[in-house]
Image (spheres, grey):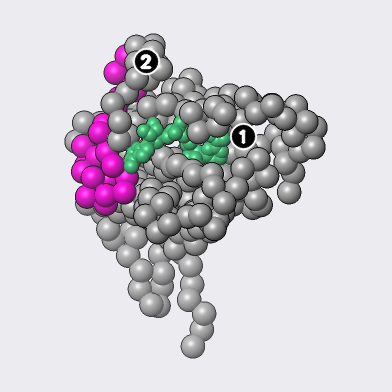
Amino acid sequence: MSPAVIEPQVVSNAAPDASTSAQVQQTHENPVYLTTEPDSSFDWKITLKNKVVAITGANRGIGLGIATVCLANDAAEVYSLDLFEPGEDFQKLATANPKRFRYLHCDVTSEESVTKAIDQIVAQSGRIDGMVANAGMTKHQPALNFDRPQLEQLFNLNVFGAYFCANAAAKKFIELGIKGSIVFTASMTSYRPNRAAPSAPYGGTKGAVRNMAHTLAMEWAKHGIRVNSISPGFVRTQMTYYVEKAPDWNLKMQYYGGMPRLADPRELGGAYVYLLSEGASYTTGIDIPVAGIVGAW
Ligand SMILES: NC(=O)c1ccc[n+]([C@@H]2O[C@H](COP(=O)([O-])OP(=O)(O)OC[C@H]3O[C@@H](n4cnc5c(N)ncnc54)[C@H](O)[C@@H]3O)[C@@H](O)[C@H]2O)c1
C-alpha cells in the first residue's frame, strides 16, 4: 500500500462556516491537513490584532504580565480565567484597557467549569484564538514529607487543569474552524531541580506539562492548532516573594550564574505573544525557556 498523501489546504483564519468540518475530515486514503501557512495578504507583523485570548490565572502574577503584553500588542480582548476575585493589579490593567481585559470565574481543575468559560467567551466575543494554560501552584518541602492530598492538589491544578484547558480550547477551535494557538506555562523545573527549594512533585507536574505540549502539537497539527510551552525561571510573583528575602540570596545568585535577579512577569510576555500570533505559524511542539540563564542547566 502506498504511503498516505498529505494535502495542505489553505483555509482563511476568519470566522467559521459550514464547510469547516469537511476541511478537517480525514480519510484513510487521503488525510487533509488544515494548514497554518499565511496567505498572500499576510503582512508578517508579529501582532495579536483581532485575536481573542484566554489566560488562566491572569488576575495576578505571570498571567497578569502575559495579559499586559498581549494587550500592548493589540489583542482585541483578553480574558482572565481565575478562581479568585480580581484585586487591585487586575483592576488597574482593566481600567487602562476598557472592554479589552475581562475576568471570568473559572476553576481549571473542573473540565465543566473550563468548558463553560470558553463557551461564555465565544458567546460574548464571537470567537477564541488563543488559550494560555498558566494557572499553577508549587509546594516546597522535602519529597519524603509529601502526603497524597498534597500531591493530588498539585497534580490536579498543574496537570489536570492544564489538560482540561488545552482540550476544551482545541474542541472549540475545531468546532469553529479556527487555527488556534495553545501555550502552556511550564517551568525550568521541568528540565532540572529547583536548587533554591525542594519541590520534586512540582517539577514532575511541569515535566508532564512540557511533554504534553509536544504530543498535543503532533495530534492537533492536522486541525491547524499549534501547541507550545514556555518555561520561566525565577519570576517575581506571590509564588516567589520569599526568594529575594533569603539571607543567602546574593551568594545563591553568584552560585547560579546568569542574570542575578528575578524577572518582572512582563518580561515573559513577548514569548507568549509570538507563540499566540500567526507569525509563529510554523512553530509548534517547542518549549521556550525564559530564565535569564539563572541556574543554568
Ligand atoms: N513565579 C515563578 O517564578 C514561576 C516560575 C516558573 C513557572 N511558574 C508557573 O507560572 C504560573 C503562574 O505562576 P505565578 O507565579 O504567577 O503564580 P501566582 O500564584 O501569582 O498566580 C497564580 C494564579 O492562578 C490562579 N489560580 C489558582 N488556582 C486556580 C484554579 N483552580 N483555577 C483558576 N485559576 C487558579 C490564582 O488565583 C492566581 O491568580 C504557574 O503555572 C507556575 O507554576 C512560575
Q: Is residue 47 magenta?
A: no
- Mark 2–mark 1 CB contact (< 8 Å): no
- Boundaries of the magenta span: 97-121
The vertical placement of 94 against 116, above or below, is above
Residue 255 locus on image (x, y percent): 79, 37
Q: Secondary structure at mark 1?
A: loop
Residue type marked 2: Glu
Residue 59 locus on image (x, y percent): 37, 27
The vertical placement of 123 against 12, above or below, is above
Residue closer to the observer: 27 or 65: 65
Residue type marked 1: Phe
Residue closer to the observer: 10 or 60: 60
Quarter of the image for residue 118 reads: top left
> Badge 1: how crowded within 10 Å, few (<14), some, or many (20+)?
many
Q: Quadrant of ligand 1?
A: top left
Q: CA distance from mark 2 to mark 1?
A: 23 Å
- Whether the residue carrying mark 1 lies under 8 Å from ligand 1 is answered with yes
- Whether the residue carrying mark 2 lies under 8 Å from ligand 1 is answered with no
Residue 120 locus on image (x, y percent): 21, 37
Residue pointed to by mark 2: 88
Left or right of residue 196, residue 215 in this image: left
Residue pointed to by mark 1: 234
Furthest residue to the front? 145
Quarter of the image for residue 143 reads: bottom right
Can residue 251 be seen here? The reply is yes
Residue closer to the observer: 204 or 13: 204
The vertical placement of 39 against 88, above or below, is below
Q: Secondary structure at mark 2?
A: helix
